[in-house]
Amino acid sequence: MTFIRMVRAAFYGTLCLISVMALIGAGMFFIAVRDLPRVPEPLSRIIETPPTEIFAATGERIMVMGGREFIPLSDISAHFIQAILATEDHRFWEHHGVDKLRTVKALWVTLVKPGRIEGASTITQQLSKNLFFSFKRSYMRKFRELLVALQIESQFSKREILEAYLNQISMGVGANGVEQAARTFFGKPASELTLAQAALLAGLPKSPTRYNPYLHLDRAKKRQRVVLSRMEAVGYITGDQAQSAFQDELNLQPPSRVARTGSYFLDLVINNLEERYGPEVVYHGGLKVATTIDHQVQSMAEESLRAGLYRLDSMLGIDEGVGRSSGGEGLRPQGALVALEVNSGAVKAMVGGRNYVETEYNRAVENNRLPGSSFKPFLYYTAFEKLGLNPATVFIDRPVTIPVVGAPDWEPENFGLKHEGPMILKRALMKSVNSIAAQLVAQTGPEEVIATAHRCGITSTLEPVYSVALGTSGVSPLEMASAFACFGKGGIRHEPFWIGRVEDALGRILEEHIISGERALDPSIAYQVVDLMRGVVDAGTGSIIRRMGFNLPAAGKTGTTDGFYDAWFTGFTPALCTSVWVGYDRGEGMRDTRGVGITGGRAAAPIWADFMRKATEGDPPREFKIPSDIQFKMVDPITGMEATAFTLNPIRVALREGQELQEHAVWEEDPVDSGKGELPSQSLPF
């Protein structure tokens, strides 16, 4: 009897569980069908989605994405139809909107192999997504898509479904649907696509940006091989045909689009949107995207960088745009410029190279190059904060040797290989003296300098070695502009951003950037570093900026790497921070026709000055905010003592409350040790 009761209890329990599950399923069904969209008639209207519009900060519309060209299935190459079916849904002709075997497999992989997600959407399900511009991934949305897929299958023939799908898929670079893609990439109608070309195009929908053959031909070819293998596996082609097609010439059409003003910036915006919402929504979801770019400032940035690089060509002895390289290949130096608002972090201009049509590689964001001495402001802030030093503290410029555990000693050299003896720290930064920077980092330790840089907004990984203080770890111009803006804002850090707001087709706000900053630096110490960098612009390595006629209050720092591979200038006014980098893509040193190395002061600073003069034209002079505990003193640049009527070339320094000047001259009895074996050793290799 006990056994019978147990069986009966189990039976009733199972029955109850099934009933509950059925009720839940029925509830989900009624919720899902409540607002289910109606499938259009004819089905071809499913591709009539609103375009996505991108706007400048001024409200001017600068780009429209969307719109497709519909062609009948009979005008599409059989190779392409087979390639898409083999890759996306090889049971398309057999199922009724849902591939049950593929769905079970996907569930099994997702459950059994954590971290791996297997796709199971059929072509019909992918087509139904066009009716759901919802930005949340949820089981309910997937369930509703499935119901619409079944509805589509019940109303339309397989040929109509496939025809609508092939006319709506996005393939990147503005090509929507197979006809536009065929003409964009190969300059021919979709009916004339070869097997090789069809396989390449069929691989693009998975990720139009990642497999863009203009930018990543190697990836596109690997994806083409996958498509050909799938075609062979399902019996559309033989192995020999697959191999032959892979080796065939693609005859890609050269990019024909004229570079838009701000193309590097727009690519960054589009890529970010694709990462968040997916290509289909970005290109056909009717988004309205408000960006931060100022169209006029962007044009000025492009003009200044282009003109500056032409001047650099002349210095290098490059004739008619043909450069010199060790391999004999024609090369020209490249450049990048980023300008952003100090008070918000909004990017107002971005140029990633000298010619967008020639190369879409965005050096302003993707190109981490060594910043050289332009990294020193982070070191000086650290020394002021951690060691209690001030701009009038005296160090001696002399040969320095720093022992490094497990590696040769570090013996940094000054530019010009000369030493001047005692000088105050403000003059050391103005003249970018490496030996004094080495003494500072030996006392602070590289980890503290790195921590300061990260607090300011540098996000790249920095190596914890002494030489990091001289800029031997790569950063991007965007990072440098953002980090220097932190100084300009008195130690308040704003994350850089380029998308202000995104709305859907119905005007609902999907995201909006709320401007907010966080305290990263002590405002008084930050101002002392700003005052040092003002000295760089007024009478230091960046003084060409004043000679070029830029007269507004400004601060900044030049940077030049060993071998003259990279030249930088990053600087700011109280309103706008701009970073400029120039150099060869392939790491070739820049020397003029006399063999003299080209520095940041000669290559990057003039571009900065030309751009900032245009971008700030008509702006009134505006001073940096001075903290209440800052006082100014005129001092002797050598002794650090208060200047007298007899002091030669006195320098004004900013002192915090409680900081005192030197009472006597500091000469060889300098308290700062800098001899071999007397500075701390570094436990990590240099």
Image: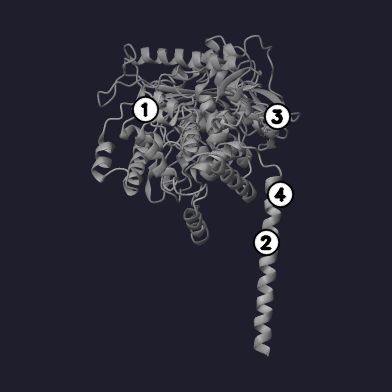
Q: Residue under circle 3? A: 507
Label 2: how many Cα within 10 Å (few below 14, some 14–19, many 20+): few
Element marked by disc 2: helix
Instruction: Tell which tag, 4 or 3, sits nearer the viewer.
Output: 4
Q: Residue under circle 2? A: 22
- Give the quarter of the image for residue 520: top right
Please name the amino acid that badge 1 sits on.
Ser
* In the foreground, 426 or 458: 458
Instruction: State which quarter of the image contains the C terminus.
Output: top left
Q: Residue under circle 4? A: 31
Q: How far is the residue under mark 1 from the one under mark 3?
A: 39 Å
Residue 191 is marked as 1
* In the foreground, 526 or 159: 159
Place of residue 554 in the rendered image (x, y in percent of width and height, measured from the top left): 61, 19
- Give the quarter of the image for residue 369: top left
Q: How far is the residue under mark 2 from the one under mark 4?
A: 14 Å
Place of residue 640 in the rendered image (x, y in percent of width and height, measured from the top left): 60, 27
Instruction: Tell which tag, 1 or 3, sits nearer the viewer.
Output: 1
Residue 497 is marked as none
Count of numbered labels shown in the rendering: 4
- Give the quarter of the image for residue 629: top right
Discs 3, 2 touching: Cβ within 8 Å: no
Element marked by disc 1: helix
Place of residue 361 in the rendered image (x, y in percent of width and height, measured from the top left): 43, 28
- For residue 509, side relative to residue 605 (left or right): right
Which numbered disc, 1 or 3, marks the residue that appears first in the sequence?
A: 1
Residue at 50%, 20% (x, y): give it.
541
Please name the amino acid that badge 2 sits on.
Ala
Coloration of the structure image: one colour
Label 4: how many Cα within 10 Å (few below 14, some 14–19, many 20+): few
